[in-house]
Amino acid sequence: MATINNDSKTNEEDKKSLNFIEAMVEKDLSEGKNKGRVQTRFPPEPNGYLHIGHAKAICLDFGIAERHGGVCNLRFDDTNPVKEDMEYVDAIMEDIKWLGYHWNHVYYASDYFQQLWDFAIRLIKEEKAYVDEQTSEQIAAQKGTPTQPGINSPYRDRPVEENLALFNKMNSGELEEGSMVLRAKIDMANPNMHFRDPIIYRILKTPHARTGTKWKVYPMYDFAHGQSDFFEGVTHSLCTLEFVVHRPLYDLFIDWLKENKDLNDNRPRQTEFNKLNLNYTLMSKRNLLILVKEGLVNGWDDPRMPTICGFRRRGYSPESIRKFIDKIGYTTYDALNEFSLLESAVREDLNLRATRVSAVLHPVKLIVTNYPEEQVEELEAINNPEDESKGSHTIEFSKELWIEQEDFMEDAPKKFFRMTPEQEVRLKNAYIVKCTGCKKNEKGEVVEIYCEYDPKTKSGMPESNRKVKGTLHWVSCSHCLPAEVRLYDRLWKVENPRDEMAAICEEKNCSPLTAMKEIINTDSLNVLTNCYVEKYTATLKPFDYLQFQRIGYFNVDKDSTADKLIFNRTVSLKDTWSKINNNKSV
């Protein structure tokens, strides 16, 4: 009788679940390419904070190396000192660590400025590059179209010595920005527009954070990226789909760098995958910067922002983000993913790690009329029913409690299973109580609710199993703490804010800021200042994960103090957004 090899079965299942990039890497390893090495890199430009889209690239770059015993380095693409800042460098490092990844080395494109300069000088000498004095508008006009060849620059055939002299002059500081550029001499009739004598160096006089004023010319991305990969020994250069048309140029520059020697077994290979696009989300760093600078949000880590630090402050766990990215996978075509899928991954993860506590966001007083006046009972509350190792904490029960206003209705419909006169409900972890009435103010608003408890129904007692249809959360008036609770919702009212902005700008000939103000969700933040929470929450640290029972998942905000507790809503217990949206469309 044949036996099943479980290890082989698992290996076969793993192979079936590989995405196309993982399959490519495994094939390269099986064929002995790059001497069996796997080396990747994550190359962000330090001109803003990372967003959820970058998380997808981080998980791929670091994950591929991690799974194959390889190396992933962090390399900052710091080739534009005008937009870059060391603040962003520090933030990027923090975000990568928070996601659970670690780099082997930190590099900067600026580490290779001298090598790139020397390479450019060599290209000039080989008549593969020339200095162009035309304006950017003239150069663009001469590029042609995908169906029409471009026109040669009048400076394309400058003598080598003149090009060398001008290139050195570009870096001397005596020329103005935009007055000259260095272009690679390739093919102005090539159907790939990127081959039509691309600009590889431009003049920028802004001092660089790492190199100071040494350089006045800086390499363009296409000229710096592939060469940096080669200098570092990268085997797999993983990029998003917009770089598909750049790949032939990436390969050409590496060929030129090594003087067309055989590189098939020892060169970086670029492979492209789809970006992460989420509905109701705007992820362009340029647009995110507008939101921050114009005060439409409260900084880069505003919990409504799609930045990694924004998600962290809102209470997302790194595991939930990684789980979401695993779910959507990697393909060679773009798609718009549902934000609700991300929220589903967050709920699934936080259910396993969040501490359960009681919080009342819209309080009304409940008086247990037959409970002894001075009596206080200490009850046990399980921290997480999904994980016994998380233990429990103590809550106090007394005569006067706070409950949610929405949990009481004086004249309730038949299927209202919360508190209403003559109906029994359970107070979670405590007793079964029956409502006996309420007190109203002169406006007719309920200010106090009265009930009686059955002392034989305390949780854990034999009669506690008596069936009631409703369970309410509560906090003791004398043993709770005041808190501020921030309820966050989606920042945009439209499903695809990027396209909607573009349409508004085109129709009204207005700025992106004006378009943003038309589609921003003005109800994306609701601050509640009259809330009460268990006093146990004062022992928790910023960013700790919580479930406010029956309400949603929350966390402790970084600005929370012992004197002023602040909590952020991470996500509701259920997906209410889809239901609201569907009702609006009916």
Image: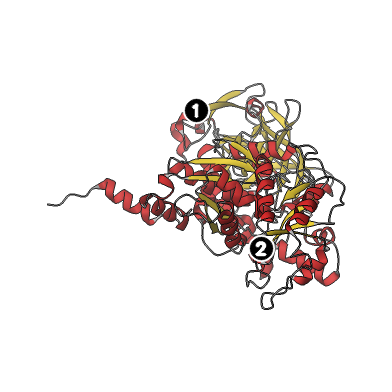
Query: Could you tell me residue 190's position as x and y percent?
Result: 63, 71
Element at label 2: helix
Q: Which residue is mark 1?
A: 391
Three-letter amino acid code of the residue under disc 1:
Gly
Residue 521 in sight here: no
Rendered position, 556 above or below 469 = above
Depicted 274 relative to depicted 585: above or below:
above
- The quadrant of the image that shows the C terminus is bottom right
* Rendered residue at 76%/62% (across/down): 158
Q: Residues within 10 Å of mark 2 (few under 14, many from 20)?
A: few
> How far apart are the two marked residues, 2 and 1, measured between alpha carbons?
39 Å
In percent of width and height, residue 413 lies at: 63, 56
Viewer-proximal residue among 430 and 59:
59
**Pick the front one: 523 or 244:** 244
Residue positioned 82% across, 49% down in the render: 169
Tag 1, which secondary structure?
loop
Viewer-closest of 272 and 563: 272
Number of the label disc, if any, that sits on residue 581: 2
Could you tell me the amino acid type at mark 2?
Asn
Choose between 177 and 524: the one closer to the eye. Answer: 177
**Number of marks in the rendered image:** 2
Could you tell me residue 437's position as x and y percent? Answer: 68, 42
Q: Residues within 10 Å of mark 1 (few under 14, many from 20)?
A: few
